[in-house]
Image (cartoon, grey):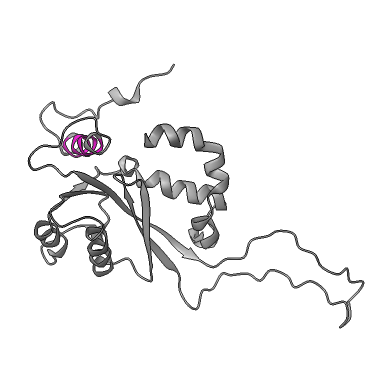
Amino acid sequence: MLCDTTSLRIPHRTSSHPFEDKKNRILELYAIADGLVEAGEDDPTVVICIDEFGPLNLQPHPGKQWATKAAGKGDVEAPRRRRMRATYTRPHGVRHMMGAYDLATDRLYGHVVTTKNRTAFIRFLRYVRKLHPPDVRIGIVLDNFSPHLSTRKDQRVGEWAAANNVELAYTPTYSSWLNRIEAQFQARGCSGGSPGVGGCWSVAAMVSSRWWVSRHWASLVRWSS
């Protein structure tokens, strides 16, 4: 039996609940970004979805290649094809991509960083703020990953948002699917295959998405219109 999941509600008291408040605010921002409603006096006119993607790593993938056939142990003139080496150890570490999906321009921006701590996140926020004039209020949709939050010991994220005409709209717990950038990341993941060893995404999976776009082009057009 099929049911409309949009009508489902978590069984809490009928009073205002943080889940409903956060979800409804994000839906309001999406309605503004899609031109369905007019922005209020204090509402953002531009909505940007932010999240991290990774960890990323340079990882070989099995495939086919032209190689000379070798009999037995082979010789210098006809060497055996080199086997694909295992990549369990990463002496140079991995990378992470900080992504921003601008709903106003339908563009995806990203920075590849070595760490995804609060300092790196604020640095990326400064870049995102420069995409639009300072007088344009921006609404940023993001999850509750610890570097995104302001704590009692570190208030930099909240202070930066207040000083730069930015509203931070956090997704409810276990509801990162409300962030539209997740679909963009999934597209890059599907195109390059499953995560590699240790749950690391390959760089090829991040940058190549032709296969996914070719299969989902019709839905992409409907979704972005």
Position of residue 49 in the picture relative to residue 163 (left or right):
right
The residue sitting at 24% across, 35% down in the picture is: 27
Horizontal relation, residue 4 to residue 121: left or right: right
Relative to 114, 31 lies left or right:
left
Q: Locate residue 124, reporting x and y percent.
A: 28, 64
Q: In the displayed orientation, state which residue is furthest to the left.
A: 41
Quarter of the image for residue 149 reads bottom left
- In the figure, 175 relative to 160: above or below? above
* The quadrant where residue 212 appears: top right
23 or 199: nearer the eye? 23
Position of the C terminus, as image quadrant, is top left
Residue 106 forms part of the magenta stretch: no
- Is residue 106 or residue 157 the one in the foreground? 106
Does 28 lie within the magenta span?
yes
Residue at 22% across, 64% down: 126
**Which quadrant: the N terminus?**
top left
Instruction: Name, please, the residue furthest toward the right.
Output: 71
Instruction: Name, please, the residue furthest toward the top.
Output: 1
x then y, percent, for residue 127: 26, 63
Q: Position of residue 187 (x, y in %)?
A: 48, 46
Is 108 drawn above or below residue 32 in the view shown? Answer: below
Measured from the top left, where is residue 153 in percent x and y? 12, 67
Residue range corresponding to the magenta coloring = 21-30
Q: Is the stretch drawn in magenta largely helix, strand or loop?
A: helix
| Above or below, comparing residue 52 to residue 217 in the picture | below
Give the mark count.
Answer: 0
Q: Residue at x 40, y 64 (%)?
A: 96
- Which quadrant would residue 164 be assigned to in this image? bottom left
Q: Which residue is found at the position 58% from the left and 70% from the top?
A: 87
**Left or right side of 202 for 96:** left
